[in-house]
Amino acid sequence: MTRQETEQVQACPVPEIDLSRVAEVLEEVDSRAGLITVLQRLQAIYGYLPEVVVDEVSRRSGVAASRIYGIITFYAQFTTEPSGRYKISVCQGTACHVAGAPLIIDAFEEAIGVTCGCTSEDGLFTLEGVNCVGACALAPVVRVGEDETHGRMTPDAARDLVADLRTREVEE
């Protein structure tokens, strides 16, 4: 295989990213004092923090890309990988673990067809394990995105939730 063929095989498709949004956010927020706020806003816009966005923030703000990546990797709220439309977070805190969180993860993995920490091929679901979500009385707890919380989850309810989300996607 030639070098050019190897580069073509290894290259991943990168979606078109409108970098003008970076400039808009940087005009609103002082990047040196509010770098976390800048990153939060950009992640809300793009759904994640792709390398080209980090490079653009660095170029426009004068903040070293290594410092930006240091922040991104320190805080769990940031991701450099695209997430599925439905981000399913299974609490793995002590109360949830004891109440069956590992079985809930198994059920989601089976229903979605991915392992925990991955995004489905259709881009619909991202499954992740998270630390305590602070709803121990409802253990085991599952969150879908930021706004939807499901307590006392069971493996059957996990499979039903995936089916419901697939139906919701078709209806929208």
Image: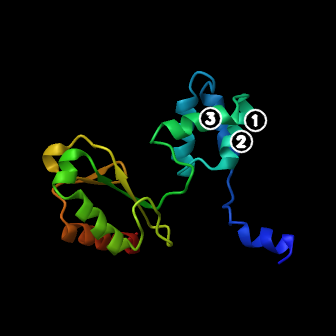
Q: Which residue is mark 3?
A: 68
Residues under labels 3 and 1: Cα distance?
11 Å
Residue 44 percent across, percent down from the top left = 51, 45
Q: Which residue ends up furthest to the top in the rendered image?
A: 33
Front label number (3 vs 1) = 3
Does residue 40 show up? no
In the rendered image, which quarter is residue 94 located in? Answer: top left
Residues under labels 2 and 3: Cα distance?
9 Å
Amino acid of disc 3: Ile
Q: Which residue is mark 2?
A: 55
Q: Earlier in the sequence, mark 2 or mark 3?
A: 2
Q: Is residue 135 above or below residue 156?
A: above
Amino acid of disc 1: Arg
Neighbor class of circle 2 (other Cα within 10 Å; few <14, some 14-19, many 20+) is some
The residue nearer to you, when weighing 81 against 2, is 2
Q: Is residue 84 above or below residue 145?
A: below
Could you tell me which secondary element the residue under label 1 belongs to?
A: helix
Q: Which image quadrant: the C terminus?
A: bottom left
Could you tell me which secondary element the residue under label 3 belongs to?
A: helix
* Left or right of residue 157, residue 115 in this image: right
Neighbor class of circle 1 (other Cα within 10 Å; few <14, some 14-19, many 20+) is few
Q: Which residue is mark 1?
A: 59
Neighbor class of circle 3 (other Cα within 10 Å; few <14, some 14-19, many 20+) is some
Residue 7 percent across, percent down from the top left = 79, 68
Could you tell me which secondary element the residue under label 2 belongs to?
A: helix
Q: How is the image coloured?
A: rainbow
* Left or right of residue 53, residue 137 in this image: left
1 and 2 marks in contact (CB < 8 Å): yes
